[in-house]
Amino acid sequence: MKILLNGICGHMGREVATLCADGYRGAALAVGVDPFALGNEAPVSVKSFKELDIDVISGIDCIVDFSHHSCVSELLDFACENSIPTVVATTGHTEAEIAKIHEASRKIPVFFSANMSLGVALLLELAKTAALAMPDAEIEIVEMHHNRKLDAPSGTALMLADAIKEVRPTAYANCGRSGQGKRVREEIGIHAIRMGNIVGEHEVIVGTQNQTITLKHEAHSRALFAEGALAAAVYVAGCEVGLYDMKSLVGGGKKDAALAR
């Protein structure tokens, strides 16, 4: 399977490139695209989609995007023009960018998830189960990442809140609680910590007056997300036109109406 890797010079791009070199899931790197590409750093890279030769484009089975959310419009224009299934693994998208992803999914298969971890997919389901089973419980989400991460709260934290809202329709996210005011049961507190070189930790705390349940996922290596992205690439390359996510990969079928951020 031939992969076009967008953002090959970034931390996650390099992880994906390493796995491709090892033939993970049968993937091989066809070409990398990155405006900051350096010849000695990424020898199979170009700085723009416009530099790609038609013969290279025709051999691409799937695009994996680990660049920056602001690049998604140009990326999807290229993908749609050439009918290439695409995995969007970036986070922090604006409403306009999310709308662009929806639009592209009507023309090509698009896999979009704020977190490429199968473990996080399981955490989402466990959080929903706990929120439903304990209707009187208060719920807080704490996420921790390295000090270079740009968006806060993380896309995964927002995914967790959205999952909980599926079973608690009146709930709403309160990001970075501050000031004065009593907590209400409907709010889901989300707290972001940025420090050091933490790969990624997400904790869902579900508590009542008498008991507390803590659900936690911890990423030990960025390779975890690279593995998930390539698994998604293999999956979506065989899909029909539509929008897919990690839940689709785990359970099969198209993505639900609620789009994970």
Image (tube, rainbow, N blue to C red):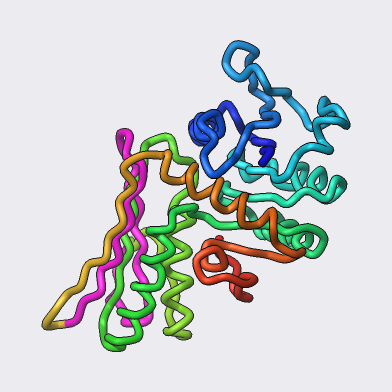
Residue sitting at x 26%, y 66%: 215
- Of residue 187 and residue 111, the one placed in the foreground of this image is 111
Residue bounds of the magenta highlight: 179-208
Residue 221 found in image quarter: top left
Task: Determine whether, in the image, residue 29 is placed left or right of residue 11.
Answer: right
- Verify whether residue 232 appears in magenta: no
Residue 141: x %, y % from top left: 33, 64
Residue sitting at x 43%, y 35%: 148
Task: Determine whether, in the image, residue 197 is placed left or right of residue 241.
Answer: left
Residue 203 found in image quarter: bottom left
Task: Determine whether, in the image, residue 256 is placed left or right of residue 100.
Answer: left
- How many numbered dots are placed on residues in this image? 0
Image quarter in which the N terminus is found? top right
Task: Determine whether, in the image, residue 165 is placed left or right of residue 217.
Answer: right
Q: Is residue 114 above or below residue 169?
A: above
Residue 117: x %, y % from top left: 44, 54
Residue sitting at x 57%, y 67%: 248
Q: Is residue 207 above or below residue 113?
A: below
Residue sitting at x 87%, y 47%: 81
- Verify whether residue 191 appears in magenta: yes
Q: Is residue 255 above or below residue 171?
A: above
Residue 130 found in image quarter: bottom left
Residue 98: x %, y % from top left: 67, 59
- Of residue 160 and residue 124, the one placed in the foreground of this image is 124
